[in-house]
Image (cartoon, helix red, strand yellow):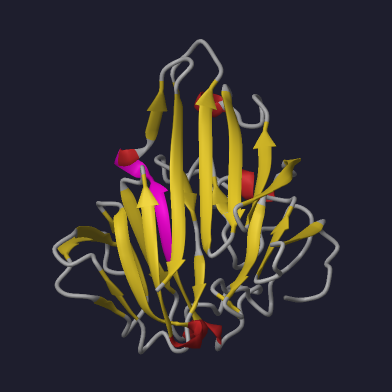
Amino acid sequence: MPALRPLHQRTFTTADASVVGVMFDQGAQVASWVAGGQDALWLSRQARFEAGVGIRGGVPVCLPWFGAGRSGQARPKHGIARTMLWTFVGEEERDGSVTVTYTLPVGAFEGSARGLSVRYDVTFGPELEMRLCVRNESEQTASFEEALHTYLAVDNVQEARIEGLDGATYVDHADGKTVKKQVGDVVFTRYTDRVYGRGGTVVLHGAAGGRSLEITCENSANIVVWNPWEGGTADMADFGDDEWRDMLCIEGANTLGEAIELAPGQAHVMVYRIRIL
């Protein structure tokens, strides 16, 4: 991890010092999870650590919309939660792990998401677990999109593959939003931007350090897979030209037609878990 940046950065270490996690108060963003001597997450060398600017890498929390939202006109991309200052509630050590809690209050968002409160519990241990709880505190129905936009480090994206999506239907945003069906493992040979119509468990082979990672997305109707490929980062000042080889995104999401609607008093909990195999 880089040295402390202008944004408030917090480091969490398990009692036996075998696991280290890093988060930023801005966006309650996980930036690093080192377990087994290797960081499973990717952070761009060009990432900007400035107030109000999204951090390229780690796990941005996308709320209350994903991408440009259901309207296709929402700005900024991926919502405002990732650039907001979250409230750090505290940390608790238990069973060899450290659980960190952040919150956002009612009124943090506008429109149909105005009545939402958010609690985010991140557990750094032999597994990384991120638990995003969104509750409707208002007397009206509330709606939102969400994603845990996880950037994963790989040795070489051209040799990486994702097992577990065979037969799943997806919308190919790299091919005019054509609806397709996955055949076999997901491999990377070009720009990839796919929204799969299912959650569940997948396995990433070729993660950094030659590892395989089991990734489970609970209460996620979508898994998003993304890599910008060569030339795809030309207009991204916070993304090195050659860094596309070292990363890919596997995101748990509820987006577009799978956006969440909550009646008054209801809550929705989305969980994203990474386990080293």
| The magenta segment | 250-257
Quarter holding residue 69: top left
Q: Is residue 266 above or below residue 49?
A: above
Q: Position of 209 compared to 198: left or right? A: right
In the picture, the quarter occupied by the C terminus is bottom left
255 is within the stretch colored magenta: yes
Q: Position of 218 compared to 35: left or right? A: left
Q: 137 or 38, which lies in front?
A: 38
In the picture, the quarter occupied by the N terminus is bottom right
| Image coords of residue 16 (percent x, y) | 70, 67
Q: Is residue 215 above or below residue 142?
A: below
Query: Residue visible at 45% across and 57% down?
Result: 273
| Image coords of residue 36 (percent x, y) | 57, 77
Query: Residue visible at 36% across and 74% down?
Result: 204
Main SS of the magenta part reads: strand
| Image coords of residue 180 (percent x, y) | 16, 63
Q: 277 or 130, which lies in front?
A: 277
